[in-house]
Image (cartoon, helix red, strand yellow):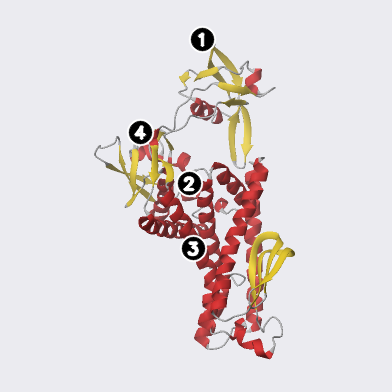
Amino acid sequence: MSSLLVSILAFSVAITVLVAVHEYGHYWVARRAGIKVLRFSIGFGKPLWRRRFGSDDTEFVFSAIPLGGYVKMLDEREAPVAEHEKARSFNQASVPWRMAVLVAGPLANFIFAIIAYWVMFMAGVPGVKPVVGTVEPGSIAAEAGLRDGDRIVAVGDRDTPTWEAAMLVILDDMLDDGVVSMQVESEAGSTGRRVDLRVAGKEEELTRPGELFSGLGFAPWRPQWPAVLEAVTAGGPAERGGLRPGDEIVSGDGEALADWPALVNFLRTRPGQEVSLGVNRDGTEFDVMITVESVTEGDQVFGRVGIQGSAPPAYPDAMRAMQSYGPIGAIGAATAKTWEMSALTLRMLWKMLQGVVSPRNISGPINIAQYAGFSAAIGVSAFVSFLAIVSISLGLINLMPVPMLDGGQLVYQAVELIKGKPVSEKTQIVGQQIGIFLLILLMTFAFYNDIARLLE
């Protein structure tokens, strides 16, 4: 199955599940409040499937545009309501009940994330131990005293059993005061030491997608494998220089290259330059001269010569980690994970508004679909983790005080609770227009980021 089809299917499943969860939260509480629900829709636009269920003859719909959904309730502000049903309209419900209905959608997304993480932690979440591979001389990490082979035991006061945990806490610590405080040990059982990475003023650069490790100046440990060429692009710089499949590259400009990633890094950092590569071909060693092609991706320029290496080997068991809990322990771990992800997301959004965090982190449907496809291809655990993260984001976004979202409607209800009367219709119309403008602006920027990533 092609990656595009996998991405489309995974995105469709993800959106359907998460929107259904969100809207069911609204639906369930509305029913408890005695409010009549007219329609429960997954998606917008033309209905593709519809059925009526329940004592209220609620219409359940799948619509053509799968980018959201809604629960339509009986409401005198939208259409005339029969006298005998007025008590069941949304606008006639008490303010606390209306607020409960509005907050129920985002709350359902958080509950879904907790359940997803609970299942994952009971099944066991595989990961890789946070061991540093190489530290770049003169980098932030090198100046702080981080060394090759160091294992990151904790960041701040939080343990880091895997690289995933370490990355999240590094980001969180970095946004706190511009200093990442690590507890590291050089080898298992050795006395730990503290390493402070000082990143104040560099947060925007470090939070660009894929730039964290390179910006800090270290790379995670990975298995080494030789720089043996599996394929050479026809007509590319490598073929023109005389390289062939099966050649092993052992050095660059006279310096030994330990493995394939070292070769890739050597070439990427020399766009437009002529380099000397040491080649081992069937036991015979010789040098070839190649002019590295210069390639531009966004605001980055890197080198490429048109070669392909073998797939990396699997991580050894000694470098693997497993986070696993019993049914009770998993509840606490899942709740803590959901809280941590929610807090980090909010902090990232706030720092983004301040210009501290890179706005390139905002993703639209194209990028989300790609991540959905990648995670689905990796396995069930990765896809469930993806669903949990997006569910948290969906819950938080809907709580923002934007009039078109649940959070904006909650503000209206809070004002009514304080003043004792509803917000004026004129104010609501103006707020709706502002909300539409802000959402269009956000989606435009998200699509721009998506397209920019595709063109990179």
Tag in front: 1 or 3 = 3
Q: How busy is the neighbourhood of tag 3: few (under 14 within 10 Å), some, or many (20 plus)?
A: many
Q: Quadrant of the N terminus?
A: top right
Q: Quadrant of the C terminus?
A: top right
What amino acid is at disc 1?
Gly
Mark 3: secondary structure: helix
Q: Nearer the viewer, residue 125 or 412?
A: 125
Question: From mark 1 to mark 3, how far is it between C-alphas?
Answer: 59 Å
Say whether residue 27 is left or right of residue 45: left
- In the picture, the disc for residue 206 is 2
Q: Which quarter of the picture shows residue 240?
A: top right
Q: Nearer the viewer, residue 240 or 62?
A: 62
Question: From mark 4 to mark 2, how far is it between C-alphas?
Answer: 22 Å
Instruction: Please report whichever mark, 3 or 4, sits nearer to the chain's N-terminal start.
Output: 3
Tag in front: 3 or 2 = 3
What amino acid is at disc 2?
Leu
Residue 97 placed where, x, y %?
52, 80
Q: Which residue is mark 1?
A: 283
What amino acid is at disc 4?
Gly
Q: How busy is the neighbourhood of tag 4: few (under 14 within 10 Å), some, or many (20 plus)?
A: some
Q: Which residue is mark 3?
A: 110
